[in-house]
């Protein structure tokens, strides 16, 4: 099975308070796309002979995101870019991805259900439309049945109600944050990063021409998130340490983290302690 | 249009008093009390009237304590002479439609003998977290204290206040009786919860006898002292429930922490916004009277959500309205984006208070000067001038904003690609992101006021001459001096600012040197490097790292340093760099030793960038210098000088 994952290298607000000052924006992989890679890697692990191809339409910085995907375990990475694509809208992005996916081939296409920067949430749907594929939007976890060549996906609705969908391949699935945390780096990541080259393509190679100027959109302001107090925290059930952590806005303590300066045996001990605690 | 702050601007009934909205200013001492000749309360009256004018619903004023032993800083023990002055004050607040309650403070064990020249009083003779060993009150003294509460309450009523709040939290006088950690009495005032509450019950009864049932009376309470020996959250709820059924009180302010937890209850920007709200929500379930919540609620959108979710009945926005008195009005009239948000730096308010000075605000130079420079009191320019501001840091931005508000035509020249000056560096330290709001508000203001901003523009005498300005404000800031030590093959030396801006990557074993700055530049850099997983030693010339930080910011900082395994060397300087590491010297013994390290990160002092000011002197009609280009200091000086320069144009 050939699984294509469409990635977006997002441009986030600088650091929370810097919005509006013109400070350099922060680049990072779109978190939901990392979940999509994770799902793809899990599917690959479950069925023999599968391949995970990651595709992005973005400027050279976007290779940071592709490298992350390679480090996680992707088999192949393609970046499409043309200076003319600056400020392209979701429709054009979908068109470019479509042409790329047609060229690479696929059985299943995954992507995050929306990006954390522009968040239009329509690229997956547009791909399904353009490639005439069935679409499952907002899936939490995927299962593949080799016998029937069908994919099934869980979705979460209001108040935690869950649905399970199924469809035959080829298909398009967009991914929500599910129980499967994206892995950090997969085994053998150094080797993969050294070995794998990112394929670079431009619009001419794809045979896509750039649409009218009127199709461009531009972000003019980014404002930081507003604070909120979590509802339903029952302080009575927390320990003193947990209360202090909550009030200092920390979710986990930094104690016991592995430092670059640690001796290897200390680092190994810390990792083991962490794993022991984590695995119970 | 339905207001986006539907709950925030819904009136609240507290006992007999209707408050126009749900925003209140919790009591904070200002040390602004003056002497008799200056009418004691005049400065304070203008200070609070400014907040009332800005649209706040309720002000709870501090400054008053119950008894001479309770004096700390400039707290007043009220007598009849104060009444006419306080009447003027309450009239000024009422004239703006707000209500005003008076806090009866009594620090008890935490009063300051340096001010009172008296021992501190409390339930039991312990030091336990206090500065002095407490004098245990006998029954006569308890009666005397209760009577002084009642007498103070009577004066407060005569002075025209709408209500009274008792300080019952944080291990102060009432709190120390409530808490099993500090009350170890074996008489009827100690032991069981009923006994520990007796002192408070007697005060409530005595006050009610004086003020009757038609005046609001409430108390604050530490719902959870966050102390294993103190009031637990279950007991806090129980106390609240008993007070509620006692029927003496009209409202309750849910607070958190004993005195030692002051890094939380006057939390800086590391404390989560609204950190005490879950505790208020818990109390709200246990009582019928209105529950007020406080602690780092600075954003009306956040406040609205707290009210909408029923977590509290009223939100305290103390430092938020200290920083921007017009916050409630701006939110109500749909101008929320114009709010100048408090950054909870605690430098102008808490730090100055602890130094015994009248409080100020780093971002609001008009605090304490409301009589002269309050909202609407800044004179418009007599003649519209063309004002050129060189430098887009806090001083330049504040000057541009103020000049534009006065009707001047303003142009900012900024050398770099963005506005913000050194704030752009400061906000990149761990947990210090909110610092950026100091200038992002000003950036928004200059945009709204139509100030022309020219980025990537280097100013010179020639370019300035071409612009033909009537007045020039030089706010060219400062830059780090050259590094005093050279890198060698094995040990590299870096500027702290380069590390903060991620321009360089220090090695794995780093010495951070604080040559006297002792503020966030060195402390934050050490923390940043530790977070990056490096082994950090923080060498400081001062008695402790963070010597110049607001005092209640230091313990959490040391806590984090301990978690990161950072070594802190006080009274030590770096005297050299050798291939083996960094040479440090104890400043008293003058003994030297080498710390094995691969990097030295030096917080070199800044040098002024005043070349342009010197060149322009005598060549332009009006010339001003503001901020770091006069002398490198902190943000408060930059903002104040930018403000004052623009007032003189």
Image (cartoon, rainbow, N blue to C red):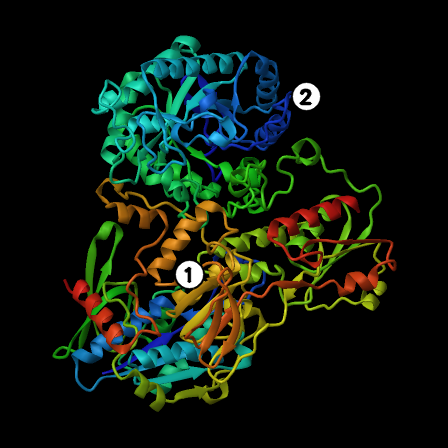
Q: Residue furthest bottom?
A: A195
The image shows residue A175 at horizontal and vertical percentages of 30, 67
- Please report, as a chain letter, where disc 1 is located: B
Query: Badge 2 sits on which subunit?
Result: B
The residue tagged 1 is B568
Q: Is residue B174 left or right of residue B467?
A: left
Where residue B320 appears, as percent x and y from the top left, is 51, 40
Residue B282, how many percent across, how many down? Answer: 28, 35
Mark positioned earlier in the residue sequence (1 or 2): 2
With B574 as the anchor, is B412 left or right in this view?
Answer: right
B622 relative to B186, above or below: below
Residues at marks 1 and 2, CA–CA distance in whole angstroms: 49 Å
In screen coordinates, is A4 left or right of A95? left
Position in image of residue A201 (x %, y %): 45, 87
Classify mark 2: residues with Cα within 10 Å, few (<14), some (14-19) or many (20+). few
B155 is higher (above) or lower (below) than B190:
above
- Seen in the picture, residue B349 relative to A147 is either above or below; the reply is above
Determine which of the numbered discs, if any, sits on residue B239 in the image.
none
Q: Confirm whether circles 1 and 2 share one chain.
A: yes
Q: Residue at x 28, y 28 (%)?
A: B183
- In front of the other: B174 or B114: B114
Q: Choose between A216 and B643: the one closer to the eye.
A: B643
Give the residue number, with chain letter if any, for mark 2: B37
User: Which residue is at 49% across, 67% downward?
Assistant: B585
């Amino acid at each position: 099975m050939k699984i294509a994952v469409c990635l977006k290298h997002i441009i986030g607000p600088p650091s929370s308070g810097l919005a509006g000052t013109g400070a350099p924006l922060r680049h990072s992989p779109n978190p939901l796309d990392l979940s999509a890679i994770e799902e793809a890697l899990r599917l690959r692990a479950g069925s023999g002979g599968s391949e995970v191809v990651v595709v992005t339409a973005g400027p050279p910085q976007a290779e940071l995101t592709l490298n992350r995907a390679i480090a996680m375990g992707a088999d192949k990475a393609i970046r499409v870019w043309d200076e003319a694509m600056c400020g392209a809208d979701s429709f054009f992005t979908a068109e470019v991805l479509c042409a790329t996916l047609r060229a690479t081939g696929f059985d299943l296409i995954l992507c995050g259900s929306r990006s954390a920067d522009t968040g239009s949430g329509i690229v997956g749907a547009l791909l399904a439309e353009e490639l005439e594929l069935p679409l499952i939007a907002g899936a939490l976890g995927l299962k593949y049945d080799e016998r029937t060549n069908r994919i099934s996906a869980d979705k979460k609705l209001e108040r935690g109600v869950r649905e399970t969908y199924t469809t035959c391949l080829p298909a398009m699935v967009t991914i929500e944050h599910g129980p499967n945390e994206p892995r950090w780096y997969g085994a053998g990541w150094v080797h993969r990063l050294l070995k794998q080259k990112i394929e670079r393509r431009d619009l001419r190679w794809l045979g896509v021409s750039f649409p009218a100027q009127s199709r461009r959109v531009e972000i003019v302001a980014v404002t930081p998130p507003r604070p909120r107090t979590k509802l339903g925290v029952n302080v009575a059930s927390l320990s003193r340490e947990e209360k202090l952590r909550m009030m200092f806005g920390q979710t986990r303590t930094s104690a016991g983290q592995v430092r670059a300066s640690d001796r290897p045996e200390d680092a190994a001990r810390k990792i083991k302690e962490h794993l022991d605690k984590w695995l119970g | 249009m339905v207001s986006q702050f539907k709950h925030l601007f819904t009136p609240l009934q507290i006992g007999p008093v209707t408050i126009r909205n749900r925003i209140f200013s919790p009591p904070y001492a200002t040390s602004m009390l003056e002497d008799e000749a200056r009418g004691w309360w005049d400065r304070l009256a203008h200070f609070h009237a400014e907040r009332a004018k800005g649209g706040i619903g309720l002000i709870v004023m501090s400054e008053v304590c119950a008894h001479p032993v309770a004096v700390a800083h400039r707290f007043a023990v009220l007598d009849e002479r104060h009444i006419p002055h306080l009447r003027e004050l309450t009239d000024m607040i009422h004239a703006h439609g707000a209500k005003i309650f008076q806090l009866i403070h009594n620090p008890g064990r935490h009063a300051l003998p340096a001010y009172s020249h008296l021992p501190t009083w409390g339930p039991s003779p312990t030091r336990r977290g206090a500065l002095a060993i407490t004098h245990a009150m006998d029954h006569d003294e308890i009666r005397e204290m209760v009577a002084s509460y009642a007498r103070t309450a009577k004066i407060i009523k005569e002075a025209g206040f709408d209500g009274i709040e008792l300080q019952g939290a944080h291990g102060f006088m009432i709190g120390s009786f409530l808490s099993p950690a500090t009350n170890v009495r074996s008489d009827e005032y100690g032991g069981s919860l009923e006994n520990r509450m007796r002192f408070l019950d007697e005060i409530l009864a005595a006050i009610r006898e004086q003020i009757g049932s038609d005046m609001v009376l409430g108390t604050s309470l530490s719902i959870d002292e966050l102390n294993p020996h103190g009031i637990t959250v279950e007991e806090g709820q129980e106390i609240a429930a008993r007070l509620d059924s006692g029927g003496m009180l009209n409202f309750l302010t849910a607070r958190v922490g004993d005195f030692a937890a002051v890094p939380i209850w006057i939390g800086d920007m590391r404390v989560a916004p609204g950190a005490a709200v879950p505790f208020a929500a818990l109390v709200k379930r246990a009582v019928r009277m209105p529950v007020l919540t406080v602690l780092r609620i600075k954003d009306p959108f956040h406040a609205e959500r707290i009210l909408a979710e029923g977590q509290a009945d009223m939100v305290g926005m103390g430092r938020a309205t200290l920083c921007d008195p017009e916050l409630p009005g701006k939110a109500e009239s749909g101008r929320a984006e114009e709010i100048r948000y408090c950054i909870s730096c605690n430098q102008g308010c808490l730090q100055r208070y602890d130094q015994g000075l009248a409080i100020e605000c780093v971002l609001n130079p008009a605090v304490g000067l409301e009589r002269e420079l309050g909202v609407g009191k800044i004179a418009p320019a007599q003649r519209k001038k063309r004002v050129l501001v060189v430098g887009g840091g806090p001083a330049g931005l504040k000057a541009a904003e103020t000049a534009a508000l006065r009707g001047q035509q303003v142009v900012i020249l900024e050398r770099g690609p963005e506005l913000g000056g050194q704030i752009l560096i400061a906000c990149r330290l761990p947990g210090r992101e909110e610092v950026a709001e100091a200038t992002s508000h000003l950036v928004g203001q200059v945009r709204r006021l139509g100030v022309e901003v020219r980025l990537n523009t280097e100013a010179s005498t020639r370019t300035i001459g071409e612009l033909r300005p009537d007045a020039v404000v030089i706010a060219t800031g400062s830059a780090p001096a050259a590094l005093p030590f050279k890198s060698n093959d094995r040990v590299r030396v870096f500027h702290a600012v380069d590390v903060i801006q991620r321009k360089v990557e220090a090695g794995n074993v780093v010495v951070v040197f604080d040559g006297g700055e002792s503020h966030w530049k060195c402390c934050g850099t050490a923390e940043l490097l530790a977070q990056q997983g490096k082994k950090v030693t923080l060498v400081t010339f001062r008695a402790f790292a963070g010597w110049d930080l607001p005092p209640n910011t230091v313990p959490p900082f040391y806590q984090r340093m301990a978690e990161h395994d950072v070594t802190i060397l006080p009274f030590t300087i770096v005297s050299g760099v050798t291939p083996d590491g960094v040479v440090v010297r104890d400043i008293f013994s003058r003994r030297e030793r080498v710390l094995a390290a691969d990097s030295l990160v030096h917080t070199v002092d800044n040098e002024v960038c005043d070349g342009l000011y010197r060149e322009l002197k005598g060549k332009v009609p009006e010339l001003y210098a503001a901020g770091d280009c006069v002398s490198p200091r902190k943000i408060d000086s930059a903002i104040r000088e930018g403000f004052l320069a623009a007032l003189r144009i």
